[in-house]
Image (spheres, rainbow, N blue to C red):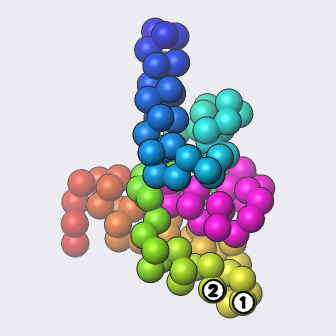
Amino acid sequence: MNNIYKNLCQVTINNLRHYDPEIKIHFERPEGLCYSIFDYPVKVLLEIEGTEGFIRECFYKILDRVVDEKNLNKYLNEISSERMTREGFIKEIYQSNERAIKMTGLSE
């Protein structure tokens, strides 16, 4: 079972590197792999350095997808201008319809 988990972690890392191999995101490091998608602790997300990396990781961990350029730019602007806090950003995407559909398979 341990080998299956290690292989799954490696596949995840390889897939994530496909998007931008220059960015080393938090859950690619060993200390981040113990958290599951949709259940990543807010306190750990808030520790991520850099606004862009923070936004990218939140999309990965909360919505299980890569952030699109439109949302990346929107949230970079909102957080950088202090119109939105990091906590507010997490809450917004956590409470999104997209996340609800991914969690339940049901749409409104």
What residue lies at 35% left-to-right and 53% top-to-bottom?
A: 103
How many angstroms separate mark 1 from mark 2 (CA)? 5 Å
Frontmost residue, 73 versus 62: 73
Residue that carries the numbered disc 1 in the rendered image? 81
Judged from the image, the secondary structure of the residue bearing numbered disc 1 is loop
Is 92 situated above or below 59?
Answer: below
Q: Residue at x 74, y 65 (%)?
A: 50
Q: Secondary structure at mark 2?
A: helix
Residue 34 in the image, given as x and y percentages of width and height: 61, 31
Magenta segment? 44-60
Q: Counting other residues with Cα less than 10 Å from the Cα at mark 2, is it few (<14), some (14-19), or many (20 or more)?
A: some
Which corner quadrant of the image does residue 96 belong to?
bottom left
**Quadrant showing the C terminus:** bottom left
Read off the residue under disc 2: 78
Q: Amino acid at mark 2?
A: Glu
In the image, residue 23 sits, relative to residue 55, either above or below, namely above
